[in-house]
Image: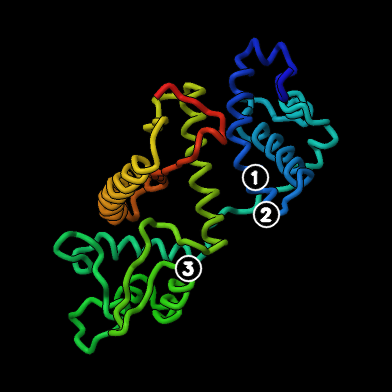
Amino acid sequence: MNPGENSGESEAAGGAPLIRAMRRILRPLVRLLIARSVPFTNVADLLRWVYVDVASRDFVIDGKPQTDSRVSLLTGVHRREVKRLRRHDEPAFRAPKSATLGAQLIARWTTEQQYLDEDGEPRPLPYMSPDAKVATFESLVRSVSTDIRPRVVLDEWIRLGLSHVDEQDVVHLDADAFVPARGTEELAYYFGRNLHDHVAASAHNLLGEGSPLLERSVAYNHLGSDSVRELEGLIRDEAMRALRTVDERARELQKRDAGAEDATRRVNFGTYLFKEDTRADGEDDDR
């Protein structure tokens, strides 16, 4: 018997394929948790709370209160535990201030005409200039926020690997994506947001809840190292082109919708690239 497949009832309901998929999904997550010294007991407690919270919020019967007994029935968590866990609210999941500011600055630097070269790429910016008409890193930062000094932002970006400054005091954007390279707090935020949204889109499609959401990928194996390097360059170029196009239009629409009564929705469009040696993983797709 395979781990997690211990119920004929779950197999009859289509649970066995889902359990197999979950086992694969959980492997990189568990690897990350072990690498960051997060023990199983902490994750088990968290998973128990999430089961109770989701059942309490998302499986309510119209016109009937969601009782501890029903949540216990839905989740398999003992009713006393359900009662205890329902007293705890989930901490708000908010972007760190540095991540929010950084995303806005990079979005402007990579899409607004005054910061782009003739090829439409973000051009290096002088840190400052006596000519107010010249686009500078200082003016870029002040166009988004006057609360934080540009030098503080630049020092942090250098630390995160987003930028470097040359001998002429010109700032270069080194990021090839909208996510910092090494900032633990920022990376953890994007990890939680993006992985949640990707899984939520896939779950929505698997459950057949309304019109399918976009969730596509191209996957090939039996490739040599040179072929993978070529594809990686192609993917990065095409992905960044798509991200910049969507980002530019989304900012225009956000300005148009400011103050509108129905401006309560959000969209997250992303890309990813993964590569590995299938001899180590054991996966062997047909393509």
In three-dimensional space, the C-alpha distance between marks 2 and 1, rounded to whole angstroms, equals: 9 Å
The residue closer to the viewer here, 277 or 176, is: 277
First in sequence, mark 2 or 3: give its number. Answer: 2
Three-letter residue code for mark 3: Leu
Which is nearer the N-term, disc 2 or disc 1? 1
| Mark pair 1, 3: CA separation | 24 Å
Would you place residue 213 above or below residue 241 in this image?
Answer: above
Q: Which residue is mark 3?
A: 160
Q: Quadrant of residue 106?
A: bottom left
Left or right: 267 as drawn, with respect to 97 = left
Question: Residue 87's x, y, as percent?
Answer: 76, 45
Residue in the image at 37% along x and 41% along y: 228
Q: Evaluate whether residue 26 shows in this view.
A: yes
User: What kind of residue is marked 1?
Assistant: Arg
Q: Which mark is residue 36?
A: 2
Above/below status of 126 relative to 28: below
Quadrant of the snapshot with the N terminus: top right
In contact (CB < 8 Å): disc 2 and disc 1: no
User: Which element carries disc 2, helix, strand or loop?
Assistant: loop
Q: CA distance from mark 2 to mark 3?
A: 20 Å
* Numbered disc in front, either 1 or 3: 1
Give the residue pinned by disc 1. 31
Circle 2/circle 3 CB separation < 8 Å: no
Answer with the quarter of the image where residue 151 lies.
bottom left
